[in-house]
Image (cartoon, helix red, strand yellow):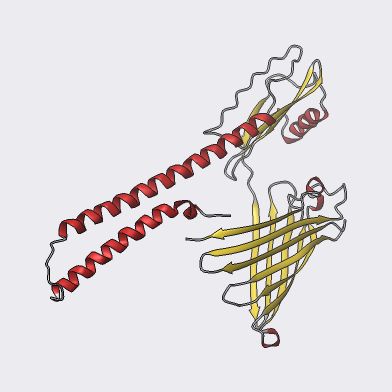
Amino acid sequence: MLGPGLSTDLGERRLRRVGSGLLVVFLHDNVAQLGYLPWQLDLQNLRFTAFVCSLGLITARRFFTNQRELVIVEHEMNTAREIQSAILPERPPASSGLVVAVRYAPMRTVAGDFYDFVAVDDRGLGMLVADVSISRDPRFLPDVPGGEAARDALLGVLLAGVAGTIPDGIALVPVYDVIDQTGIDLQVTSGGWLWKLEAINRSGQGDRYAALTGGVEYTFANMAATGIDLGILTEYAFDERDERALTPLEDDIFVGARLAFNDVSNTQVLGGAAIDRESGASFLNVEASRRVGDRWTVDVEFRGFVNVPPDDLFLYGIRQDDYLQASWTWHW
């Protein structure tokens, strides 16, 4: 992975040349004022011209660099728009007695929302709208006479795909969830020990539930007088919602190690595995980094999945997405 600075070597060489010229002029003026040169030259205009040209060169370089980055971003956004358009339905399916019109307009180039249709029969049509929103945006639910019980019954009808039973005049209304949450975040450091605990208890979005993540790390410092530190760490993640949790870590144990060489190249290695206590599914993670010279760093990352059962809703779909990534980064 190369930073943008490598593509501007020509500009850097020009800046070095201008800087070297200004340094020569500066030395000339100082040596001439000391009377060590047999000639006297008035280089004030030359210095001012060189200064203005340097500012112009720097401004132009930044301008063209920004324009190049904007072109790259625009190309990526266009690619994202094409991908998004490809996964959206071209037109609503035909349904007897029902006309559906769709207008999908992102704010700028792309949006995170998704919709699709499910044709039940010639008189029934199911619609899916996945809305990506921030925490301040509401959910939209059917406004059904009879309160929450009637609304849940209507949602069950929609999910079951039963046609002809939805009453007229149903509208979607915004619903702002009000939650009640209590949390705690603790960290204790004592010698080579590090203890951490994060826990919450929340109500307002379904049933009240509790979730926590806690762990401990112990560091063996300066092993065998080599300057190398070895940290052994373990964590436990729990979510009372179990399979309804919005995270794969609802009853998992993480075991890993951190190796810090404490050398001038800042060499570090971190590896471990998260294991589901119920299914035995494991997520493997290894990260390593090292600085090379004054401007380069090399990074290696590995992600892998082992023993993922079909009933693991989070990990089964990505069970074959193991990958190994190596990158070289140039810093300026």
The N terminus: image quadrant: bottom right
Residue depicted at 57% across the width and 39% down the height: 76
Image: 56 above or below 87: below
Residue extending furthest toward the top: 97
Residue 188 % position (x, y): 65, 76
Count of residue discs: 0
Residue nearer the viewer, 38 or 52: 38
Residue depicted at 70% across the width and 58% down the height: 201
Residue nearer the viewer, 188 or 207: 188
Residue 258 % position (x, y): 70, 72
Residue nearer the viewer, 217 or 213: 217
* Among the 4 quarters of the image, the one containing residue 271: bottom right
Q: Is residue 291 left or right of residue 194?
A: left
Image: 138 above or below 61: above
Image: 144 above or below 232: above
Residue 111 visible in image: no
Residue 25 visible in image: yes
Residue 287 % position (x, y): 68, 63
Q: Is residue 176 left or right of residue 254?
A: left
Residue 58 % position (x, y): 34, 52
Residue extending furthest toward the bottom: 225
Image: 96 above or below 32: above
Residue extending furthest toward the front: 38
Residue nearer the viewer, 296 or 153: 296
